[in-house]
Every structure is written in C-alpha cells, then in structure tokens.
Amino acid sequence: MASLPLVGLPTDRKPIGSHPFLVVGEKYVRAVVDGAQAMPLVLPLLQPPLPAQAWLQQLDGLLLTGATSNIEPHHYDGGPSWAGNPHDPARDANVFGLLPQALAMGVPVLAICRGFQEVNVAFGGSLHPRVHEVPGLADHREDPDSPLDVQYGPAHALALSPGGLLAGIAGAGTVQVNSVHGQGVSRLGTGLQVEARAPDGLVEAFRGPGPGFLLGVQFHPEWRVLENPFHLGIFKAFGEACRRYQKQKQS
C-alpha cells in the first residue's frame, strides 16, 4: 500500500505573549488530511531561512495558506506601508525563496488567500493594498464582529473561466464563495491564467502555466471542506496531483 503523499505547510510567525511562535491554522491542516487525503508536514519558517531543498526533496505537495499578515509592499512596488498593517517578513523571505524552487521541481502547489497573493507577486504581479479603496471594486473584507460561520459564509458569486480547472470541479459557470480579504490582485503575474473573477472584475483564482499543478484562490476552500462539494473538489484535485507527483518520484 502506497504511503500518503506529504504536503508541506509553511508557518506564520506570530507573537503570543512575549514570545514569537511558529503557527499554522488548524483548518488548513485538517483540509489536507480530510480533503486532500494527504499527510501534513509543518515547515518552520525561520530567519535566516532554512535550506528549501531539504524540505522539497521530501514533499509531494505545498500548501500556501492564508494568514492575518500582509506581504510587505516593497515586494511588489506597492508604496509605503501604513501603521497597523500586519507584516511577517520571515514568511515573505521564506516563501519567496521556497516557491520558485518548488515550481521548478514540479511540486504541486495550492495557494490560498495570502498564498494566492504570494504566487502572484512571485510571478511579477502586483497587489491592491486596500481593495475597498479602489474605485469600482467592492469591499471584500469580512465583518470581524460576526460569528465565524457568517464571516466564512457565501458572500458573492464567482464567474468561472470556461474550460478551466475550477469550472470542471464546480460543473457550472458560477459558484458562491466566501470573501475574507482586504488585499487583492492588481496586475496579474506573467503567465498566470485567470480561473475566476468576482462580480466587480477582481481576479479571484488563477492557474499556473505549464502542465504542473499550480492553483491559486483568493477565497477559502479549506473552510468546512467536507461540507462544501466545491471546496472538497479543490482539495481532491490537489491531493490527486500530489499522488501523481509522488508516484512519478518513485518511478
């Protein structure tokens, strides 16, 4: 019996009390186990970064998660930051070093929210630091005072690109998704192909160039992954790509 594919989840650096902790949201770990049918491996992001190759040689997939922090604007010529804008320079430094190597090796990558934005920046794209302040774009943020089920409940429709991966998973041209983000794609990275747009035209999903598995989504399919067929379909597709990569490495 084949072993479960190994999926790496890079950590966030968060202060708890007086000490920094390296953490990964449980919902992402749970989605790897239940949705992708894979074994999660937490990757500690330190400064200076640990050698990426030591991880990548063992991994069959990489999940770039959402986070409470934002990418520092200097990575995408986004101008100066502002007071209260949460950053995680350790994650920035690690992921922007790890991701190109993973893609060069053909490691399947699923990128969610902050991870979606990281991929776009890594491909030379840029971000809207505050989507709600851009004329013509909607406010895509959640109400932080609402219960989690409301924050992560359906917020708007997505128009799925005909013939795309997400359209195939959904079996339809539109789907309802949650909306829990303040930043978003401004200029799409070179070679990335649009998979879905919000009603205001904002890019909410893309896939990578070439035959490998690279899917980025701005919404949160990890939320209640077993209760939402579309969410589950995304993680199943990722898990299948990880198993193919695992088998390819072993052949």
Image (cartoon, helix red, strand yellow):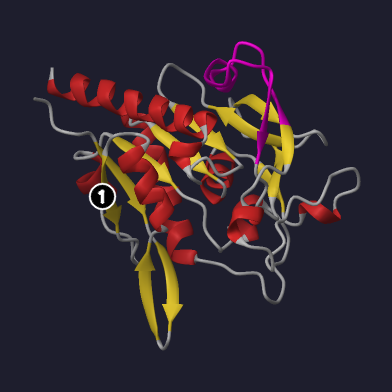
What residue appears at the point 67 percent right and 45 percent down from the top-left corner? 126
Helix, strand or loop at label 1? It is strand
Query: Residue 16 in the image: x percent, y percent?
Result: 42, 80
Front residue of 107 and 246? 246
> Neighbour class for label 1 at 10 Å: few (<14), some, many (≥20)?
some
Any part of residue 188 in sight: no
Instruction: Answer with left or right where residue 141 lies relative to residue 191.
Output: right
Front residue of 38 and 119? 38
Q: Is the C terminus in the top left, top right, bottom left or bottom right quadrant? A: top left
Instruction: Answer with left or right where residue 28 lies relative to residue 33.
Output: right
Query: Residue 97 in the image: x percent, y percent?
Result: 40, 49
Q: Which residue is mark 1?
A: 41
Image: 24 above or below 171: below
* Residue lying farthest to the left in this orientation: 1
* Residue lying farthest to the right in this orientation: 135
Q: Which quadrant would residue 99 be assigned to in this image?
A: top left
Any part of residue 146 in sight: yes
Disc 1 residue type (three-letter): Leu
What residue appears at the point 30 percent right and 61 percent down from the top-left corner? 44
Q: Which quadrant would residue 109 be assigned to in this image?
A: top left
Front residue of 85 and 153? 153
What residue appears at the point 37 percent right and 36 percent down from the top-left corner? 35
What residue appears at the point 67 percent right and 18 percent down from the top-left corner? 161
Instruction: Answer with left or right where residue 227 lies relative to residue 85.
Output: left
Query: Residue 178 in the image: x percent, y percent?
Result: 65, 44
- In the image, is residue 42 part of the stretch drawn in magenta? no
- In the image, is residue 176 part of the stretch drawn in magenta? yes
Image: 30 above or below 168: below
Query: Residue 195 in the image: x percent, y percent?
Result: 62, 24
Q: Which quadrant would residue 80 be assigned to in this image?
A: bottom right
**Over which residues does the magenta segment extend?**
158-177
